[in-house]
Amino acid sequence: MNDSAEFDSKPDRTPTETGPTLQDFLAHREEACPSCGYNLRGLTGNTCPECGSALVLRVGLAQPISIAWVVSLVSSGMGFAGAGTFLSLAIVVAPPGWIFETVSGWMMSILTPVCSVLLIALATLRRRFNRWPKRRQRLIAGVMAVGVLVTLFLIVVLFEN
């Protein structure tokens, strides 16, 4: 006898369902309501008894992609690409010694390796980053995005002078 036949015999199921119900899933599990955080163990209906939110049983990614991780990755990539491009242009176009004589040159020569290290670290440590609290993830992503954008803006402004 297959597992789906056991679940199909329950009266609170619709005829099209073939897997466990929300109540079956929560019978012996400690899961929090995604809306209010109430413990749903032993749930008897399809709504949270605390806040009344409708609940459904869904399949999700085991390692969801964090928006904060993507923003951090893109920010460090932009910093690497932007500073690296300006640094390459400065080496080719600028007079000899310009890189070490100007603030813009120093910023580019520091930002390029820093952003490359951040890019490699973020790419390899995605799982660890995703386990951090959401607040810390957002803070890191925000600081990186603002920092890289401000630095690239300053490089462009100082490059013109």
Image (spheres, rainbow, N blue to C red):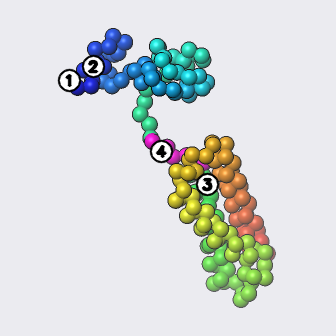
| 96 in the magenta segment | no
> Is residue 7 toward the left or the right of residue 45 in the image?
left
Numbered marks: total: 4
Which image quarter: residue 102?
bottom right
Q: Of label 3 and label 4, which has the lower sequence position?
A: 4
**Distance CA(mark 2)–CA(mark 4):** 30 Å
**Place of residue 160 in the rendered image (x, y in percent of width and height, measured from the top left):** 75, 73
Mark 3 or 4, closer to the camera = 4
Q: Of label 2 and label 4, which has the lower sequence position?
A: 2
Tag 2 and tag 4, C-beta contact below 8 Å: no
Say which quadrant the C terminus sits in.
bottom right
Mark 2 or 3, closer to the camera = 2
Q: Amino acid at mark 2?
A: Glu
| 63 in the magenta segment | yes
Report which residue position mark 2 lands on. 6
Say which quadrant the N terminus sits in.
top left
**Distance CA(mark 1)–CA(mark 4):** 33 Å
> Is residue 107 toward the left or the right of residue 54 in the image?
right
Q: Residues within 10 Å of mark 4 (few under 14, many from 20)?
A: few
Looking at the picture, tell me which residue is in the foreground, 42 or 148: 42
Report which residue position mark 3 lands on. 72
Q: Of label 3 and label 1, which has the lower sequence position?
A: 1
Considering the numbered disc 2 on the image, is that residue within a helix, a strand or a loop? helix
Q: Which residues are magenta?
A: 62-69
Q: Amino acid at mark 3?
A: Ser
